[in-house]
Image (cartoon, helix red, strand yellow):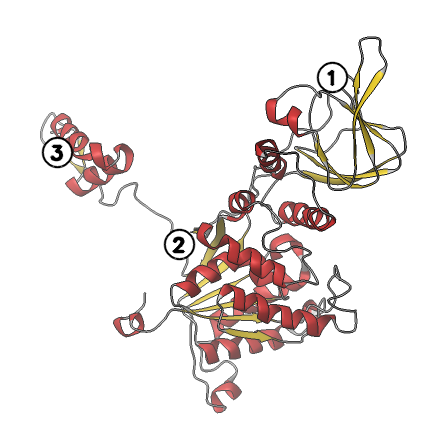
Amino acid sequence: MRTALQEQTPLRLLGVYAHPDDETFCAGGTLAKYAAAGADIMVVSMTQGEAGQIRNAQAATRRTLGRARAHELRRACQELGVQHVLCLDYGDGKLKEFEQRTLVGKVTEIIRTFRPDVVLTFGEDGVYGHPDHIAVGAATDAACALAGDPEQFPEQLADGLSPHTPGRLYHSYFPRNRHLLMDHLVRWLTSCDTRFQGTLDFVHGLVFMANETTTLGYSSDHVDVCWYPPSFYIIEQGEPATSLYLILSGQADVMCDNPDGSLHQLAVIGPGAFFGEEGLAYNRQRNTHVIARDSVTCLVLSPGEPTAFAGRGEEARFAVYPGQVSAERVAATTRIDVSAYVQRKMAAVAAHRTQCPITPDLFPETIVRELFAHEYFVRMYPRIEMETELCLTAPMRDHTPGNATTRFASEALRHAAMTYAGAAEGNFLLSTMISVRG
């Protein structure tokens, strides 16, 4: 709990991550929200991310990638309103090889220098098992526990630093979401006044976004890139609608059946064109054939993994395995509503040009707001204690002869009534409960 003196100074928030762009994906909306509220924020990346992808050859080469990503980190933090940025160079992909005390010592030094009230970092799963994420999370956990101990890293005290223990420590958390990116896209596509035709930049960006959202658990689609040879029936008229398609390369004929069994051509579609959305939107069978004119590659979004025994045609069954979200091993303790800051988060994502081939306005605002409206955390310190009572006030036993009714204090009754009935009905239910019980 912050003291009266601390309440007069801005909240200090520290985020410790492994690579540039981790800060945006893990907590970009939260950082923007607290920065807008006046918090003093520092973001640390333990590496320059030099082993990452190069998705934009104009933005970097392998030799310059580390410097480029360090610059992108500063730009992204500007978009989020973060005031302090530190990009270290411990070696992308090498953090697990370091002596743990080296990393712990550096994070301890940062904590003692910046003196944060709240620290954000990775959990022990590293979001999706990344060894660098796991190493940074473990080092930050240890540093938060040791930074207040004057016997730990005494050389830092000799250099003028003093012990400091952050008030709270949180791990970023990505609950597996049952929502489908496919469904969001279908609703948007069928609401457009004219048929949408995406640019190559949109195609590139959506492939990236589909993979990122499923990896991080924002959506639970099965994402695939499929190649179809010339004359292949990608979808057939009359068969059940199960997947949404976006053409990445090649051209396809949109055909429908004539009464005599011949085919009638309706259109030719190419890169940037979606198909399959109408059957999904209205839960009906496919109304056309889509046949590869030449070699066609598609991004395919499905509610589950395709089976190896799917049939084709009007009687087709078993196209995909039912989508399942596995049980969570831990649960979030904190959910931050960042819906008002989603566009700032998207601007920060776009600032990481070498990694994220998008622009802030590439996708409809309705879709990004639905996907990224909340960010989740698990509070690690101070631990949330296990409750030992169901109510705020312990129940009292009425030992009047012949009456073994358990009575709750009036505060507990009011709490229950207002919680379950709502403020408008709370007083009525409170009086009713008292009269019945009393």
Q: In the picture shown, does residue 33 fall above or below 268? A: below
Q: Which mark is residue 399?
A: 3
**How far is mark 1 from mark 3, CA to CA?**
72 Å
Secondary element at tag 1: loop
Q: Is residue 158 above or below residue 341?
A: below
User: What label sits on residue 384 in the rendered view?
Assistant: 2
Q: Is residue 390 left or right of residue 355?
A: left
Do the residues under discs 1 and 3 have CB atoms within 8 angstroms?
Answer: no
Circle nearer the N terminus (3, 2):
2
Say if residue 47 shows up in the picture.
no
Helix, strand, or loop for circle 2? Answer: loop
Foreground tag (1 vs 2): 1
Residue type, mark 3 in image: His
Give me the C-alpha separation between circle 1 and circle 2: 55 Å
The quarter of the rendered structure image containing the C terminus is top left
Circles 3, 2 touching at the beta carbon (< 8 Å): no
